[in-house]
Image (cartoon, rainbow, N blue to C red):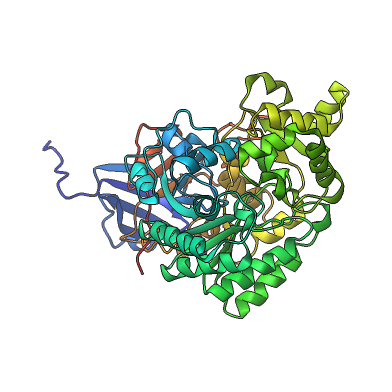
Amino acid sequence: MDPVDFTGLPDLAIRDADVVDGTGEPSYRADVAVKDGRIVSIVKEAALAGCQRPRAVRELDAEGLVLAPGFIDMHAHSDLALLRDPDHSAKAAQGVTLEVIGQDGLSYAPVDDRTLEEVRRAITGWNGYGDDADFTWRSVGEYLDRLDEGIAVNAAYLVPQGTVRMLAVGWEDREATPEELDQMRRLVAEGMEQGAVGMSSGLTYTPGMYATGSELTELCRVVASYGGYYCPHHRSYGAGALQAYEEMVNLAGEAGCPLHLAHATMNFGVNKGRAPQLLDLLDGALAAGADITLDTYPYTPGATTLAALLPGWAGEGGPARVLARLADDATAERIRYEMEVTGSDGCHGVPVEWDTVEISGVTAPELAPYVGRTVRESADLRGETPWTVARRLLREDGLGSSILQHVGHEENVRAIMRHRVHTGGSDGILQGDKPHPRAYGTFPHYLGHYVRESGVLSLEECVAHLTGRPAARLRLPDRGLIREGHRADLVLFDPATVAAGATFEEPRTLPTGIPYVLIDGRFVIEDGRRTDVLAGRAVRRTPL
């Protein structure tokens, strides 16, 4: 028998897949061929009788599997994990092929030596301090170049407004001077020119929360001029949630900037059952011509750092000043009163309920006994007040403790995920011994629980929420859909078995039912196991 001549053949032919193409349209059965990292042919079943099936160097039998575009995580906190964890199965095993990082207004570029140290301290609870990262970059472009050296999945970057303000203004709670505002405009413009896809804010986090609406509007005008979008973690998800959403809608409209609402939840007791009011607000803006999308994670608890619950004034001056205030008994009592009685802006205007605040991770090993317990549970065990426990953790862990906050409502989660501008985002914090399971389970949880088990979304709708719609928001012309000529960022999953393995008890368990994941036509997950392929790169802004 003569040897087979593979010259010119596609690298891979995926046979008999049920294609869910990312548009929301009904699935179809097809053979899909891939060559040089792109989809080169799609032969639908109805055409097979009259067409020769595509031959390829390798053929993969996908009988019983759904072929979809790779999932896009619109809200990720893998800014350091992508660099220090080549495996990164937390996302790769979920079928995620692109993450959007630089979220919530705080990340590691652009920085100088001073602000790099400050931001590392400020978000230790999100990403760790970064002892195992090289930090050779300072600009956005240099950070993206570092990602281009090879990472597990692709990544797009948002210019973090809080970090920009840190550079130009510092940690002071005041309006920016005209000169400082000009510097912030330049920093945002440089980040966009170097490849960022937009700008994020964390308006319950210092120092970004100190920005006025007019300051944010001016920065959004810069973002819009480059074709980017604004992604705010707005000023309240609690007592003032609807007003905070309205502020962002109006601000983005005034700036002429597309708006993407980060982890768009309605949390705390004051917002139980109020998701329809948020959706009415958004529908009105959309009907008037606004360009708005949003993302959510499919769980009720949130996750952040313990320090994030502090009032904004306590954060003025940066992490060292926060610790000094906590060390002073009189100032600490003022902090406690605002948190427990009046409701701090860091806790969204709602008095903190310590029985909802679970410690998920610490950086100091001696504090490990607190992990997995709520602050109130630890206080009861020790015969102390909850504030005594919280203050100890904040001080002894150097503000590095991470938390779960059990304050969400299932009816709100379901209502928002059904909306036509919804996309999926994990908001996954990978730091800590018991992180939120959303970091390892968001995308299979959508497919397994909310599609197959609950029927909240159809399979085609859900895939569109996780692929085509986010790709459109990111203005990526060749990702997010199964189309000839598009990049072969693909996931194959079993719709009958796909499920999140991660639980609140075992949050790092990998999902089931996702045997294959490809990035640029290369297998990063094969037969359910992580390969050694590092096919991910920085995905830069598409020029206007």
Horizontal arrangement in the rendering, residue 46 relative to residue 166 (left or right): left
Depth order, front residue of 296/17: 296
Q: Residue at x 37, y 49 (%)?
A: 538
Task: Judge whether 490 appears above or below 234 on screen.
Answer: above
x, y percent for residue 13: 31, 48
Q: Quadrant of residue 123?
A: top right
Horizontal arrangement in the rendering, residue 266 relative to residue 134 (left or right): right
x, y percent for residue 42: 34, 59
The N terminus - image quarter: top left
x, y percent for residue 202: 61, 53
Q: Quadrant of residue 251?
A: bottom right
Q: Residue at x 60, y 50 (%)?
A: 207
Q: Residue at x 39, y 58 (%)?
A: 190
Depth order, front residue of 67/544: 544
Horizontal arrangement in the rendering, residue 476 relative to residue 40 (left or right): right
x, y percent for residue 520: 33, 48
The C terminus - image quarter: bottom left
Task: Tell me if residue 69 can be seen.
Answer: no
Task: Judge whether 441 appears above or below 456 on screen.
Answer: above
Horizontal arrangement in the rendering, residue 213 relative to residue 493 (left or right): right
Q: Residue furthest bottom?
A: 288
Depth order, front residue of 274/163: 163
